[in-house]
């Protein structure tokens, strides 16, 4: 957990130098949560999002949340889905439990393959 | 880690075997000869039954604990069962083998007497559970990906047949939920996307015969067979109500019950799908989770009319009547999953609110209900509660435990 900020700095540097323009263009100005809060959020996503999307995030009653599965979805659409849910489906709104900044962080974390 | 863990595990198994040896055997000197001799020497005298054994899913590590619910202890851990992030278990009818259905589509047959994995097949991409036929010869697995149901020989796990839920019009295969055995070599299940209930007759398990009941309601999320196998009830996520099939009168088709139970009140978000099984029906009443309301619905099973709504702490996940039927235990979806409530049946009121641990995912009664075992995922423990006093009797360590399945299920319809 202590290496988390370092990993983010490295990831940020990688973004700057990589040719992955799609990721660099993502509207992510979200500051990283504290290491403690990040651990809580990772647990929330794995365990509680995982109730439907699978502990390994490969899907269940809900769709998979792997990096590949999310590749075709925009950050904006994912952010709206996480915070507001999707009416008419089983996806509930997570706004009571995540700030907008944290939801943006979750999207990037999922796009990075949800590392521990 | 591997060595010390293995050593610990071995000593635990030997410990429990040694104890049964001592019970059956006077010759203590043989103990000095070492574990392997012990195992060999023990083979005949250490007879025991399986009626008080059980399986606890350790969801994060792909392992199951084998437990003894008379002595409240762990006997062994069986590893290598794949992704058990969601898992369920049915038992062979001699209550010796547990069939474990894992999230990754793995179907594992575990010998709970010997404490070992007997056989394992990968049968789907994403699976949710299964059932065993009334004659104990056919194990059925219900799948999300690619959808449908697969039938296996209970002895060999040889694939016998596949029932596809592929719909030519939509091009999709419905996810299968709520698979339950019915008397007479039949299974019932529901199709999440298609909104149908299907009953398959597996008298000839290589050639199952399907009866379809379309248009039962939107998004059935789980289903149950009553303990006499007469009724199949599917809960609906997309509508306020349940779909009921009376298998004594199949010609009457599926009808809607408890229709519009939440009418006039706003639906709350649901952060975990409730689960249904035959424990919902007891003493002529049905106790069911409302969807999107912090309530337990109580219906009369003679006319299936709503009798009461019991206000509870959160969105119910499991609503389970004690074997005696005297009380009903309820656990809850996130963010209320640190709480368990007990409903008194004669008065239909909550008489106790427990905070037994964080992430209470499942509850299981001992065969006659003197205890209930709770799994606390986030505190890595099992909590054993005395149902007479509602006091905690004991806690046992377990790694991220979820489902607890005791072997009494082997002899129950719909389990």
Image: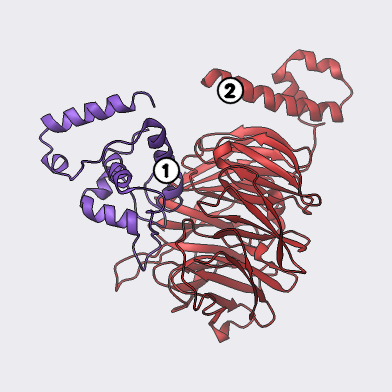
**Where residue A92 appears, x then y in whole percent?**
40, 59
Residue pictured at 63% horizontal, 25% vertical: B9
Q: Are marks 1 and 2 on the same chain?
A: no
Asked if A111 appears above or below B76 in the picture, the reply is below
Q: Which mark is residue B6?
A: 2
SS state under label 1: helix
Q: Residues within 10 Å of mark 1 (few under 14, many from 20)?
A: some
Tell me the quarter of the image containing the N terminus of chain A. top left
**Where residue B98 appears, x then y in whole percent?**
62, 46
Give the letter of the chain under mark 1. Answer: A
Residues B113 and B135: in front is B113
Q: Is residue A56 toward the left or the right of residue A113 in the image?
A: right
Asked where in the image residue B71 lies, by quadrant, the reply is top right
Disc 1 designates what residue? A46
Give the letter of the chain under mark 2. Answer: B
**Where residue B122 appears, x then y in whole percent?**
44, 46
Asked where in the image residue A102 lies, by quadrant, the reply is top left
Chain B appears in which tint? Answer: red
Residue pictured at 87% horizontal, 20% vertical: B27
């Amino acid at each position: 957990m202590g290496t988390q900020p370092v990993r983010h700095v490295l990831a940020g540097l990688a973004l700057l130098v990589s040719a992955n323009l799609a990721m660099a263009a993502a509207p992510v100005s979200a500051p990283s949560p504290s290491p403690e809060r990040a651990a809580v959020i990772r647990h929330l996503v794995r365990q509680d999002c995982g109730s439907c999307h699978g502990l390994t995030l490969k899907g269940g009653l809900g769709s998979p949340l792997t990096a590949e599965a999310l590749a075709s979805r925009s950050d904006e659409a994912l952010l709206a889905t996480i915070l507001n849910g999707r009416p008419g489906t089983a996806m509930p709104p997570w706004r009571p439990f995540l700030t907008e900044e944290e939801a943006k962080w979750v999207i990037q974390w999922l796009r990075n393959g949800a590392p521990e | 880690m591997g060595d010390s863990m293995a050593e610990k595990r071995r000593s635990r198994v030997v410990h429990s075997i040694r104890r049964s040896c001592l019970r059956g055997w006077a010759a203590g000197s043989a103990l000095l000869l070492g574990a392997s001799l012990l195992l060999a020497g023990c083979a005949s005298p250490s007879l025991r039954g399986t009626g008080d054994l059980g399986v606890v899913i350790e969801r994060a590590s792909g392992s199951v604990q084998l437990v003894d619910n008379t002595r409240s202890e762990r006997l062994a851990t069986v590893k290598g069962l794949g992704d058990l992030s969601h898992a369920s278990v049915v038992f062979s009818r001699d209550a010796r083998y547990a069939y474990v259905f894992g999230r990754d589509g793995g179907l594992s047959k575990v010998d709970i007497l010997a404490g070992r994995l007997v056989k394992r097949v990968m049968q789907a991409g994403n699976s949710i559970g299964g059932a065993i036929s009334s004659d104990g010869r056919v194990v059925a697995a219900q799948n999300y990906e690619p959808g449908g149901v697969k039938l296996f020989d209970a002895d060999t796990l040889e694939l016998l047949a596949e029932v596809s839920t592929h719909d030519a019009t939509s091009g999709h295969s419905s996810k299968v939920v709520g698979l339950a055995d019915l008397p007479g070599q039949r299974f019932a299940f529901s199709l999440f996307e298609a909104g149908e209930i299907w009953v398959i007759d597996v008298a000839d398990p290589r050639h199952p015969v399907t009866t379809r009941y379309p248009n039962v309601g939107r998004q059935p999320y789980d289903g149950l067979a009553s303990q006499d196998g007469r009724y199949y009830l599917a809960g609906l996520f997309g509508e306020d109500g349940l779909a009921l099939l009376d298998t004594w009168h199949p010609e009457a088709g599926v009808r809607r019950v408890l229709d519009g139970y939440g009418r006039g009140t706003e639906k709350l978000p649901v952060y975990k799908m409730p689960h249904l099984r035959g424990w919902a029906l007891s003493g002529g009443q049905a106790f069911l989770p409302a969807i999107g309301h912090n309530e337990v619905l109580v219906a009369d099973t003679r006319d299936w009319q709503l009798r009461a709504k019991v206000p509870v702490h959160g969105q119910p996940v499991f609503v389970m009547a004690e074997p005696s039927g005297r009380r009903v235990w309820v656990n809850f979806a996130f963010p209320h999953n640190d709480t368990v409530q007990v409903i008194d049946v004669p008065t239909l009121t909550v008489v106790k609110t427990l905070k037994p641990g964080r992430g209470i995912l499942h509850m299981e009664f001992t065969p006659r209900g003197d205890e209930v075992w709770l799994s606390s995922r986030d505190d890595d423990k099992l909590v054993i509660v005395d149902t007479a006093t509602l006091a905690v009797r004991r806690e046992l360590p377990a790694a991220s435990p979820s489902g607890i399945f005791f072997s009494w299920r082997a002899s129950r319809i719909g389990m």
